[in-house]
Image (cartoon, rainbow, N blue to C red):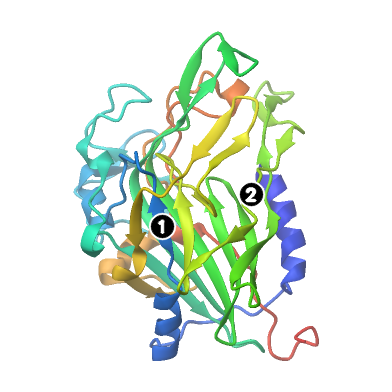
């Protein structure tokens, strides 16, 4: 999947003019940029049966310790201001103070998050301005969920829509960062990316139809095998989900749909199959409307060699936001553990390539 994702992004980057400048963020946000960020923040429809709601970082961190690969506690009683960061944190992970009853169990109260009503949960919004010919602005809207509920998958033999043999709930993980990203050019929308688990789709803005239209989607690894070391490895089997063809708006806000339990973002209310054999499916509908513009924490992008400070210090943590993996005996068949390792944080997510500098002849 990683190699396939790299190939898709490499091809995509050619479309949007690869090889750009590394820009530094503005010292202060201008009213025009802030207005763009707020007016184009998404309306997220949470599923009508969603139990695992989003939360603040402050709500989640007291429930975990920071551990190394051997399970040694490196940091205890964590707050956003004190969370360890930097390059050394990349090999660390968060671990719930209370153990799970089983790899697919969700017996901790923290997993059910907080109410989104009245702007109760923020969306962490990272923006980056470029000094290029198009005055490019990239904005990523990040939502944090304390728990990602996995999927019921057939680990026996699927026959005519039924499973002969065992079914397992796979792909659960503690901690879940989900996001969509928007690129603006000269103060107008240019492209949106919707992130779905480890893949996603790009949509380009159409001013005539006043919506975003499907451009390119990433494929999903659909099979695994064993390599010469008898370790799991990707095979050639891949599947491109049937991505919705548009992302519509309410006013200027993109309307996106969060999958029940796993929170991947899609452009329509539907059943979205992304690995057909098992099968793995996302279910979306118009359940609870999350008006993200009610509570945005707007954060300037910083290059990796500069640290965030104060109540944004938590952004410097480069490890996994969740427990170590467990229940992996079916990984060779499905590519998933019952409990997967947690995701990395916002600083690892890059959806668009840097634009070309002003002096480039390709800026036309």
Pinpoint residue 155: horizontal percent, then vertical percent: 56, 17
**Quadrant in which residue 52 is drawn:** top left
In front: 190, or 172?
Answer: 190
Instruction: Relative to 84, say whether 124 is above or below.
Output: below
- Mark 2, residue position: 243
- Residue in the image at 43% along x and 69% along y: 41
Q: Secondary structure at mark 1?
A: strand
Q: Residues within 10 Å of mark 1 (few under 14, many from 20)?
A: many
120 on left or right of 349: left
Question: Residue 81: in sight, yes or no?
Answer: no
Mark earlier in primary sequence (1, 2): 1
The number of numbered badges drawn on the structure is: 2
- Residue in the image at 49% along x and 23% along y: 328
Question: Residue 359: in sight, yes or no?
Answer: yes
- Mark 1, residue position: 44
Pinpoint residue 283: horizontal percent, then vertical percent: 48, 39
Could you say which disc has been placed on residue 190 in the image?
A: none
Q: Secondary structure at mark 2?
A: loop
In front: 180, or 350?
Answer: 180
Instruction: Relative to 13, say whether 322 is above or below.
Output: above
The quadrant of the rendering that contains the C terminus is: bottom right
Pinpoint residue 34: horizontal percent, then vertical percent: 40, 83
Instruction: Relative to 78, say whether 13 is above or below.
Output: below
- Residue most extreme to the top: 165
In front: 96, or 13?
Answer: 13
Instruction: Relative to 111, say whether 118 is above or below.
Output: below
48 on left or right of 161: left
- Residue most extreme to the right: 361
- Residue in the image at 28% along x and 56% along y: 57
């Amino acid at each position: 999947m990683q190699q396939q994702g790299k190939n898709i992004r490499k091809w995509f980057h050619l479309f949007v003019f690869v090889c750009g400048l590394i820009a530094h963020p503005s010292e202060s946000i201008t009213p025009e940029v802030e207005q763009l960020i707020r007016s184009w923040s998404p309306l997220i429809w949470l599923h009508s049966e969603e139990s695992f709601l989003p939360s603040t970082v402050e709500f989640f961190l007291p429930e975990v310790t920071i551990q190394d690969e051997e399970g040694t506690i490196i940091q205890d009683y964590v707050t956003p201001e004190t969370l360890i960061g930097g390059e050394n944190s990349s090999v660390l992970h968060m671990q719930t103070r209370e153990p799970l009853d089983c790899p697919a169990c969700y017996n901790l109260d923290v997993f059910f998050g907080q109410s989104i009503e009245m702007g109760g949960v923020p969306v962490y919004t990272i923006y980056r301005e470029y000094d290029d010919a198009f005055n490019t602005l990239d904005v990523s809207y990040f939502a944090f969920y304390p728990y990602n509920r996995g999927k019921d998958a057939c680990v026996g033999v699927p026959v005519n829509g039924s499973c002969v043999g065992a079914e397992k709930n796979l792909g659960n993980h503690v901690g879940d960062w989900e996001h969509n990203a928007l690129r603006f050019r000269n103060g107008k929308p240019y492209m949106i990316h919707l992130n779905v688990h480890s893949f996603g789709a790009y949509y380009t803005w159409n001013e005539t139809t006043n919506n975003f239209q499907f451009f390119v989607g990433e494929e999903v690894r659909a099979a695994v095998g064993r390599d010469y070391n008898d370790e799991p490895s990707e095979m050639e089997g891949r599947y491109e989900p049937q991505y919705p063809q548009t992302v519509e708006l309410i006013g200027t806000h993109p309307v996106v749909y969060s999958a029940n339990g796993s929170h991947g973002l899609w452009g329509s209310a539907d059943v979205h199959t992304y690995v057909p054999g098992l099968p793995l499916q996302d279910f979306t509908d118009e359940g609870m409307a999350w008006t993200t513009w009610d509570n945005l924490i707007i954060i300037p992008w910083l290059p990796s060699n500069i640290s965030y400070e104060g109540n944004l210090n938590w952004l410097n943590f480069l490890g996994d936001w969740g427990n170590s993996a467990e229940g992996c005996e079916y990984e060779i068949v499905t590519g998933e553990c019952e409990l997967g390792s947690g995701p990395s944080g916002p600083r690892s997510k890059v959806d668009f390539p840097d634009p070309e500098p002003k002096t480039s002849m390709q800026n036309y």
